Amino acid sequence: MEKFYDKKDVISKLIDLDQELNEYNLPYKLEFIIFGGTAFMLHAEFRATLDIDAIFNFQADKRIRALLYKYNVNESMRSVMEVPPFEEFYPRCQLLNIPFNNLRVLLPSIEDLILSKLFSSRGIDKDGQDLINSDLIDQCDLDKLKKMYYDYKKYVIFPDYRYNDLEEILIAREKVKMKKK
């Protein structure tokens, strides 16, 4: 499996996928929302990643799933992301501004992307480190993020033990920024 090292790698792979989809004569565009490390990469500088984590907004048959797999696009996010719920983050998504013929690719708001890492059920270490070591938190509306975080925290199971704590992440992020100065 090849790695995506930067935004250019991701966009190139999506363009190749879009071109190969021409052969399928789809009656509609395949819409998905990119999350995970790839979304971080599209919003800011970030570490390399192996795949494109997405939430599909379409029903994929076997041949479409096989093609998405070939291009390292997977729908694993639904199983690791408890909040924010789809119906709440979807209206806040932004269209990736690339003229695709067969794809409609969306990115979550920066705040929703951060929340997906804070409330990931994969475990706190990797996702917490992603937040601490990237500059994504520096780009967000911190007041909005805090409000959303504390609102969503009320609805998750074991919020103090299972997920990343926003205040701890913010303190650790400040330490990283101080070291860079």
Image: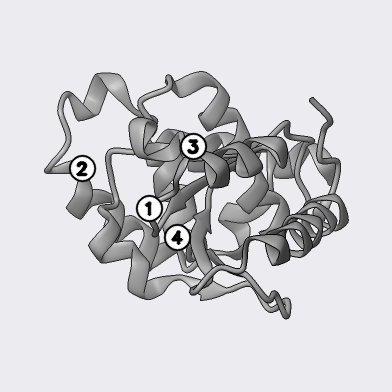
- Pointer 3 or 1: first along the chain: 1
Could you tell me which residue is drawn at 62 percent across and 52 percent down? Answer: 39
**Amino acid type assigned to the residue bearing label 2 in the image:** Lys
Q: CA distance from mark 2 to mark 3?
A: 15 Å
Describe the element under mark 2 as helix, strand or loop.
helix
- Pointer 2 or 4: first along the chain: 4
- Tell which tag, 1 or 4, sits nearer the viewer: 1
Say whether marks 2 and 1 touch (CB < 8 Å).
no
Residue on which the image places disc 4: 111
**Amino acid type assigned to the residue bearing label 3 in the image:** Ile
Pick the front one: 173 or 105: 105
Q: CA distance from mark 1 to mark 4?
A: 27 Å
Q: For label 3, count other residues whose C-alpha is less than 10 Å away and answer few (under 14), some (14-19) or many (20+).
A: some
Residue 169: mark in rendering: 3
**Amino acid type assigned to the residue bearing label 1 in the image:** Gln
**Amino acid type assigned to the residue bearing label 4 in the image:** Glu
Pick the front one: 124 or 26: 26
- Pointer 2 or 1: first along the chain: 1
Pick the front one: 59 or 12: 59
**Structure colour scheme:** one colour
- Pointer 2 or 3: first along the chain: 2
Residue 153: mark in rendering: 2
Residue on which the image places disc 1: 59
Residue 71, given in percent of the width and then of the height, sits at 72, 42
Could you tell me which residue is drawn at 52 percent across and 74 percent down? Answer: 94
- Tell which tag, 4 or 3, sits nearer the viewer: 4
Residue 82, given in percent of the width and then of the height, sits at 28, 38
Pick the front one: 42 or 16: 16
Q: CA distance from mark 3 to mark 1?
A: 36 Å
Q: For label 4, count other residues whose C-alpha is less than 10 Å away and answer few (under 14), some (14-19) or many (20+).
A: many
Q: For label 1, count other residues whose C-alpha is less than 10 Å away and answer few (under 14), some (14-19) or many (20+).
A: few
